[in-house]
Protein backbone atom coordinates (compact mmCIF):
# COMPACT_ATOMS: atom_id res chain seq x y z
CA UNK A 1 0.00 0.00 0.00
CA UNK A 2 2.77 2.37 0.77
CA UNK A 3 4.63 1.86 -2.47
CA UNK A 4 2.39 3.94 -4.68
CA UNK A 5 2.05 7.01 -2.45
CA UNK A 6 5.74 6.73 -1.61
CA UNK A 7 6.70 6.86 -5.26
CA UNK A 8 4.47 9.82 -5.86
CA UNK A 9 5.73 11.78 -2.92
CA UNK A 10 9.33 11.19 -4.01
CA UNK A 11 8.54 12.64 -7.40
CA UNK A 12 6.85 15.61 -5.85
CA UNK A 13 9.65 16.16 -3.39
CA UNK A 14 12.33 16.15 -6.06
CA UNK A 15 10.34 18.55 -8.20
CA UNK A 16 9.62 20.77 -5.24
CA UNK A 17 13.19 20.83 -4.02
CA UNK A 18 14.54 21.85 -7.41
CA UNK A 19 11.99 24.63 -7.61
CA UNK A 20 12.69 25.75 -4.05
CA UNK A 21 16.45 25.62 -4.55
CA UNK A 22 16.22 28.53 -6.92
CA UNK A 23 15.03 31.02 -4.35
CA UNK A 24 17.20 30.15 -1.33
CA UNK A 25 20.18 30.03 -3.66
CA UNK A 26 19.97 33.78 -4.04
CA UNK A 27 19.44 34.40 -0.35
CA UNK A 28 22.30 32.12 0.59
CA UNK A 29 24.70 34.23 -1.45
CA UNK A 30 24.20 36.99 1.07
CA UNK A 31 26.41 36.56 4.12
CA UNK A 32 23.93 35.75 6.83
CA UNK A 33 26.54 35.17 9.50
CA UNK A 34 28.14 38.57 8.94
CA UNK A 35 25.58 40.95 10.33
CA UNK A 36 26.97 44.37 11.17
CA UNK A 37 23.89 45.28 13.16
CA UNK A 38 24.75 42.56 15.66
CA UNK A 39 28.21 43.92 16.31
CA UNK A 40 26.90 47.28 17.42
CA UNK A 41 25.60 46.15 20.74
CA UNK A 42 23.28 48.60 22.38
CA UNK A 43 24.54 49.71 25.73
CA UNK A 44 22.93 47.62 28.37
CA UNK A 45 20.78 49.68 30.63
CA UNK A 46 21.93 48.04 33.80
CA UNK A 47 21.66 49.84 37.06
CA UNK A 48 22.70 48.71 40.48
CA UNK A 49 22.52 49.91 44.03
CA UNK A 50 25.49 51.93 45.12
CA UNK A 51 27.54 50.16 47.80
CA UNK A 52 28.98 53.46 48.99
CA UNK A 53 26.03 55.82 49.33
CA UNK A 54 23.35 53.09 49.25
CA UNK A 55 21.33 54.88 46.61
CA UNK A 56 19.02 52.59 44.67
CA UNK A 57 19.82 52.01 41.01
CA UNK A 58 22.21 54.91 40.95
CA UNK A 59 25.11 52.88 39.59
CA UNK A 60 25.28 52.62 35.85
CA UNK A 61 27.61 50.43 33.90
CA UNK A 62 29.32 51.18 30.64
CA UNK A 63 30.95 48.41 28.72
CA UNK A 64 33.62 49.57 26.30
CA UNK A 65 34.26 46.58 24.09
CA UNK A 66 36.97 48.32 22.06
CA UNK A 67 39.25 48.93 25.00
CA UNK A 68 37.79 45.96 26.91
CA UNK A 69 37.12 48.00 30.00
CA UNK A 70 33.93 48.15 31.95
CA UNK A 71 33.11 51.08 34.19
CA UNK A 72 30.52 51.30 36.90
CA UNK A 73 29.72 54.74 38.23
CA UNK A 74 27.32 56.08 40.79
CA UNK A 75 25.29 59.09 39.72
CA UNK A 76 24.79 60.15 43.31
CA UNK A 77 28.22 60.09 44.87
CA UNK A 78 30.20 60.06 41.60
CA UNK A 79 32.29 57.12 42.73
CA UNK A 80 33.34 54.86 39.92
CA UNK A 81 35.25 51.69 39.30
CA UNK A 82 36.84 50.32 36.17
CA UNK A 83 37.59 46.72 35.46
CA UNK A 84 38.93 44.72 32.56
CA UNK A 85 36.27 42.86 30.63
CA UNK A 86 36.06 40.39 27.81
CA UNK A 87 33.31 39.45 25.42
CA UNK A 88 31.85 37.16 28.06
CA UNK A 89 31.66 39.85 30.70
CA UNK A 90 28.44 41.47 31.69
CA UNK A 91 27.68 44.65 33.51
CA UNK A 92 27.00 42.74 36.68
CA UNK A 93 30.51 41.27 36.54
CA UNK A 94 32.07 44.71 36.69
CA UNK A 95 29.72 45.65 39.49
CA UNK A 96 30.65 42.48 41.36
CA UNK A 97 34.33 43.27 40.91
CA UNK A 98 33.66 46.63 42.49
CA UNK A 99 31.94 45.03 45.47
CA UNK A 100 34.81 42.59 45.87
CA UNK A 101 37.31 45.40 45.77
CA UNK A 102 35.37 47.33 48.38
CA UNK A 103 35.13 44.25 50.57
CA UNK A 104 38.85 43.80 50.47
CA UNK A 105 39.39 47.47 51.22
CA UNK A 106 37.05 47.29 54.17
CA UNK A 107 38.77 44.30 55.64
CA UNK A 108 42.08 46.06 55.75
ZN1 LIG B 1 26.88 56.23 45.34
Image (tube, helix red, strand yellow):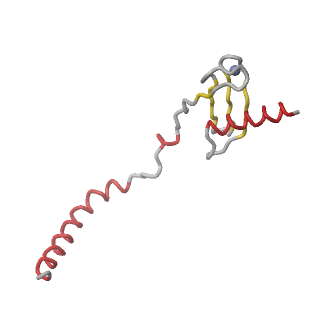
Residue at left offset 63%, top offset 37%: 92
Task: Give the residue at x 31% y 59%.
Answer: 25
Q: Tell me: residue 65, above or below residue 2.
A: above
Q: Position of residue 42 (x, y in %)?
A: 52, 34
Q: Nearer the viewer, residue 87 or 28?
A: 87
Which residue lies at the image location 73% right of the left edge and 23% below the top edge? 52
Q: Quadrant of residue 17?
A: bottom left
Percent position of residue 18, x then y? 23, 67
Ligand 1 is in which quadrant of the figure? top right
Between residues 39 and 42, which one lies in front from this camera angle?
42
In screen coordinates, is 108 left or right of 61? right
- Of the 4 image quadrants, the one containing the C terminus is top right
| Residue 100 drawn at (x, y percent) | 75, 37
Q: Quadrant of residue 84?
A: top right
Query: Residue at 19% of width from left, 66% of height from top?
Result: 16
When asked about the image quadrant of residue 13, the answer is bottom left
Toward the top, the furthest residue is 76
Quadrant location of the N terminus?
bottom left
Q: Is residue 40 above or below residue 74?
A: below
x, y percent for residue 98? 73, 33
Front one among 63 and 25: 63
Image height of 54 relative to 36, above or below: above
Q: Is 7 situated left or right of 25 in this image?
A: left
Is residue 103 or residue 64 the one in the foreground? 103
Name the residue at the right extreme.
Answer: 108
Amino acid sequence: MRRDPGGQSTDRASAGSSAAAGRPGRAASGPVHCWPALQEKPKLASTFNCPLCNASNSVRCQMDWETERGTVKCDKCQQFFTSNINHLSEAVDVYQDWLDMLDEANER
